[in-house]
Image (cartoon, rainbow, N blue to C red):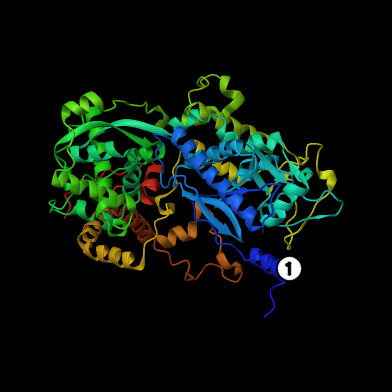
Amino acid sequence: MAPPTDEDIEWFRSTFHSIPKPQLPDDCIEYSLYWISPFGTIDSTTDADVARSRLNEVQKAAAELVKSLLKDYIWQRDAFKLEMTREDGLNLLRGRTEYGDSIEDEWVIVYILRELTKQFDDLWVKVSDSDGEFLLVEAAATLPSWLEPEVANYRVWIHKGQLLIIKPDNAKGSTVKKLTFRQARKIILEDPKRLMHSPTIEGEAFYRLRNYPKQIDDNLHTSPITIPRKLAHILHMKPAYISPAVDAFYIRDPISLRPLKSKDTTSLTFQPEDLVTVSTRFTRVGYAQLKSQDFELPPVWKGKLPPETAIQDYARAETGMKVTSGFEMLLSDPQNQDKVVVREIKVVLEDIETGDEKLPTDEEIESTWEKREDDEKWLDISFEDLEDELKGRQRGEKGAKAAGTFGDQAAQENLQRIVQQFEEFLNDDRAGFDGADLIDEMDSDDFEVDSEDFSSDGEDKEVSFDEDQFSKMMQEMMGLPSKPEGSGRRATSKRVEELDSDNDEDKDDSKQIEELSNQMEAELKETGVLDLDPKRKKKKGIKGKEPARSGGDEGNDGDEDSGDDDYDFESVDFNVAKNLLESFRSQAGSAGPGSNLLGMMGMPLPKDDRELE
């Protein structure tokens, strides 16, 4: 059989790259590091060995950089990591980090990668997440019109600390096509004039890094909490264990809550006894997740918390109770048993039981452990302060608060930047519903590009506005975590069956809800609220006007009731109340649609403090 020709190899490569690659999961960043040297070739075995050797040096430098910059850093989910791999016959370093709700973890990684490229002249870095080239999303308002997501892959690079973009051929009538890595490498080495470096685009893309590396410490929060001594020892050994425990608490479900709901508490790993107060380091997002959620006190903790009148002690004990519950759920949930962190914690617990690990004494904790309590003002964001900031130029009006009262400095800068971009968008007469002067979509992957679209520095003369990015930036600036459902936990079919089984076991709760709903209906009827005449209301309509007819049937004068008009208003009011109560009950103290809707209507329900069955 004849060996493949160069044409066969090129055909295979083009076909391989045309196959759609699997999408990255949500809340995940992927980074690829390539060694592109003008003195080597891709297919040479010798040059491949040189590239592998140089990438090993990059890997060691990255480890040193992480050690110096992130010595005490805590990741929300996964840590930064680089592994040697091969793709399409090429050696490269690649890593993937799931950052959960902590957007700042993503930017810590971008900062590390940018610093790495300053140390190695032949290092080229590509980053992406579930949004694609998210650096371009950050700079959406400054991008040239030809740089659409469909053609952006392998065009955006971090090199020598700069953001470089591969422009299309400037020839009149040329098209913008997708690039493969080999094509991008050829342009980088043979046609460097097509590498566009725009300070404006770069400034927007790296705007979140403006306060780094100082801001790295600001991503964390330290607070004293009251927890069992055994747990305090584990967290003192490795503070990073706090993140998976908080995550287990935040995305809890009835299965993970089983040990805490059980009346038999002998199986619990961390009994609420021998409690100590220690300073514990969290990610800011993790701390906000703990503080923001109402959590029904487990039976074993009843009577263990100080009185609520002792505000500070109660707050520390309540947060410690949530942390301890998170560790219980993390260690007991069957789906976590294969996780490295769970195996490590269980080894430490075994050493404690056998006496190989000694628990710290009160004197040791008092004299040698860190004592720190960070300010929690960053948690206090009122809509009044936000409204004052959004007024912008009207801040000086009577009754407006002084500048700088909303959030921290970074939040103020982000908000001012958002407002400025939004004002520019509103003042742009060319802007339509889809943004400012966006190019028309085409069926093919190729786009026409005119050399006149570029200014002298390579930037596009037109400006566009990304409404989705505006919304995303607003949410991130507010520090709002995404919904727990988007956190990445996906129930297996077995787990779904277990959840259904739990629902069957909760029939008593359903009966209680039904009884409560019946009582509410009876009370509402006594007040006359539900004493409605559907037929009279149907004929009268709103404010005495005849109601509009659906379906456009002009021959129907409304003398006969149609199926849609047979509307039982009593049933609707009752069912709405019943469904809201059921929704609130099923939340088990966590955030959810029921409590959110009632809260928006100014009717927050109290916690359900009834004893668990």
Farthest front residue in view: 46
Location of the N terminus by quadrant is: bottom right
- Name the residue type under label 1: Asp
Q: Using the image as rendered, state which of residue 561 and residue 573 is in the foreground.
A: 573
Residue annotated with mark 1: 6
Residue 398 showing in the rendered view: yes
Q: Nearer the viewer, residue 515 or 427?
A: 427
In what element is the residue under mark 1?
helix
Task: Say few, some or many: other residues with alpha carbon within 10 Å of mark 1 (under 14 / 14 to 19 / 20 or more).
Answer: few
Residue 270 seen = no
Nearer to the camera, 422 or 462? 462
Q: How many labels were placed on the picture?
A: 1
**Quadrant occupied by the C terminus:** bottom left
Q: Position of residue 203 (x, y in %)?
A: 65, 34
The residue at the far right in this view is 172
Residue in view at x 29 percent, y 57 percent: 337
User: What x and y, as percent, mark residue 112?
Assistant: 53, 38
Relative image position of residue 125 (x, y in whole percent): 61, 45
